[in-house]
Image: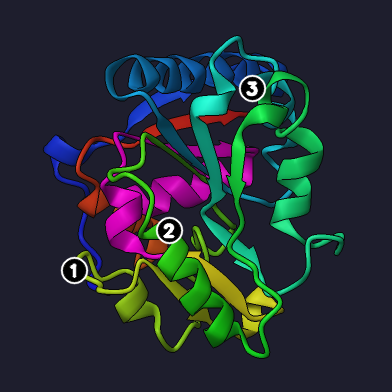
């Protein structure tokens, strides 16, 4: 990856909040509004969400949004190669916190499949994701303190192909020592093509990482910010 400072045209839109509760409330309203508009205009909506420890509160707020959840497909930005009963499963996080209440009627498309290898599971997910209407209406990214987002880990040998805006695979396997288990991830074209692309981060450390990426540090999140079709909306709270 070539480090470049952000050009003015692609600078993200910053949405800072004093508390995580305030952030979750505002972001849930923003996402629900985009999904509702998509349903009104096209009869369906697609939402891709991330895992980790940050989004649970957001999911709980969003799950009660008064939209036509039967017309929404929820999928994941990335997933560990673990079954959904694993405590490390992003699908489990989404099912427990998002796909409840009104949102329980949404369709859920997992990335994990009980295949022999992560490569086989990614191929199954790739075929299923290709059936979804494009572009996705909303993609919500997280970010690690190493600057990774989705499963775009800095030490992944396949990182250049994962962040290629012309990548042919929509879903790809990932092996990275820093990622722990093998991973399955949506690749760059689908992420940066989203009608609404959100980066949801919390804490001073991640704010500093974002600042480094915006200044041109060589990080996967910087590649996303530079290549997104629309300015990324960054939601941050302490």
Number of numbered labels in the structure image: 3
Q: Residue, x 78% and y 68% (percent of image)? A: 83
The mark that comes first in sequence, 1 or 2, is 2
Q: Quadrant of the N terminus?
A: bottom left
Describe the element under mark 2 as helix, strand or loop. Answer: helix
Range of residues picked out in magenta = 186-214
The mark that comes first in sequence, 3 or 1, is 3
Q: Quadrant of the C terminus?
A: top right
Residue 62, disc: 3
Residue 129, disc: 2
Describe the element under mark 3 as helix, strand or loop. Answer: helix
Where residue 40 appears, x then y in whole percent? 34, 14
Which of the 4 image quarters holds residue 184? bottom right
Which of the 4 image quarters holds residue 101? top right
Instruction: Please determine whether, in this image, residue 228 is positioned above or below residue 111.
Output: above
Residue 122 visible here = yes
Question: Is 178 within the magenta?
Answer: no
Q: Is residue 66 left or right of residue 168?
A: right
Residue with the mark numbered 1: 166
């Amino acid at each position: 990856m070539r480090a470049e400072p952000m050009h003015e045209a692609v600078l993200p839109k910053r949405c800072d909040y004093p508390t995580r509760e305030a952030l979750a409330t505002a972001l849930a309203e923003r996402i629900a509004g985009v999904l509702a508009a998509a349903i009104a205009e096209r009869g369906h909506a697609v939402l891709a969400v991330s895992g980790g420890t940050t989004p649970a509160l957001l999911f709980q707020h969003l799950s009660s949004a008064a939209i036509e959840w039967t017309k929404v497909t929820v999928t994941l930005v990335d997933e560990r190669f673990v079954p959904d009963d694993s405590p490390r499963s992003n699908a489990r996080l989404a099912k427990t916190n998002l796909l409840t209440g009104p949102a329980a009627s949404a369709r859920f498309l997992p990335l994990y499949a009980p295949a022999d290898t992560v490569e086989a599971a990614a191929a199954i997910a790739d075929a299923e994701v290709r059936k979804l209407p494009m572009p996705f209406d909303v993609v919500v990214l997280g970010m690690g303190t190493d600057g990774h987002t989705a499963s775009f880990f800095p030490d992944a040998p396949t990182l250049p192909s994962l962040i290629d805006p012309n990548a042919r695979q929509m879903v790809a396997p990932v092996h990275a020592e820093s990622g722990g288990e093998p991973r399955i991830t949506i690749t760059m074209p689908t992420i940066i093509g989203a009608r609404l692309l959100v980066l949801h981060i919390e804490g001073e450390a991640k704010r500093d990482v974002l600042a480094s990426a915006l200044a041109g540090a060589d990080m996967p999140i910087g590649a996303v910010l530079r290549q997104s079709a629309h300015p990324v909306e960054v939601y941050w709270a302490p």
